[in-house]
């Protein structure tokens, strides 16, 4: 009697788990398509942010250059490096989600 009861309970639980798997796959596919639809606008937004940061950096470097500051080259290199890193990072993240 016990063995039949446990077998029935196990089969019912297993059937419920198997039926629930289909909903999880469709939810993951839906989330994946939603994330991919957000990537393009977010990428464009980050490129605009990079451009603004680059412009601010150019203004700061010009201000140092105009005032004759000795560390103009160091400042220019750091701003340029940060802009290059930001653009490469955004491109890599985009490739990760769309590739």
Image (cartoon, grey):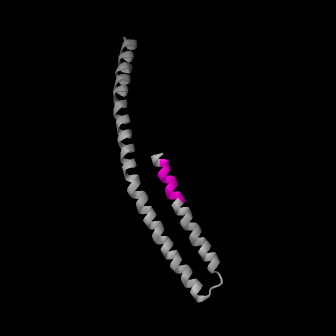
Direction bottom: furthest residue: 67
| Residue in view at x 34 percent, y 21 percent | 12
Give the answer, above or below, for where 91 lies relative to 14: below
Residue 98 in the image, given as x and y percentages of width and height = 45, 47
Please report the bounds of the magenta region as a residue range: 88-96
Residue 61 in the image, given as x and y percentages of width and height = 56, 79
Does 90 appear in magenta? yes
Give the answer, above or below, for where 30 lies relative to 37: above
Nearer to the camera, 4 or 92: 92
Direction top: furthest residue: 1
Using residue 95 as the reference point, say whether residue 15 is left or right of it: left
Residue 97 in the image, given as x and y percentages of width and height = 46, 48
Q: Quadrant of residue 24?
A: top left
Dominant SS type (magenta): helix
Nearer to the camera, 31 or 81: 81
Give the answer, above or below, for where 46 lies relative to 14: below
Does 73 appear in magenta? no
Direction right: furthest residue: 70
| Residue in view at x 35 percent, y 41 percent | 30
Residue 16 in the image, given as x and y percentages of width and height = 34, 26
| Residue in view at x 40 percent, y 54 percent | 40
| Residue in view at x 58 percent, y 88 percent | 67
Total number of numbered discs in the rendering:
0
Q: Quadrant of residue 18?
A: top left
* The N terminus, quarter of image: top left
């Amino acid at each position: 009697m016990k063995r039949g009861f446990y077998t029935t309970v196990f089969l019912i639980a297993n059937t419920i788990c198997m039926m629930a798997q289909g909903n999880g796959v469709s939810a993951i596919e839906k989330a994946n398509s939603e994330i991919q639809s957000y990537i393009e606008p977010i990428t464009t937004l980050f490129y605009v942010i990079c451009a603004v940061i680059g412009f601010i950096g150019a203004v700061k470097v010009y201000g140092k250059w105009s005032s004759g500051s000795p560390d103009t080259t160091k400042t220019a290199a750091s701003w340029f490096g940060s802009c290059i890193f930001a653009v490469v990072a955004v491109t890599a993240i985009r490739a990760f989600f769309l590739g």
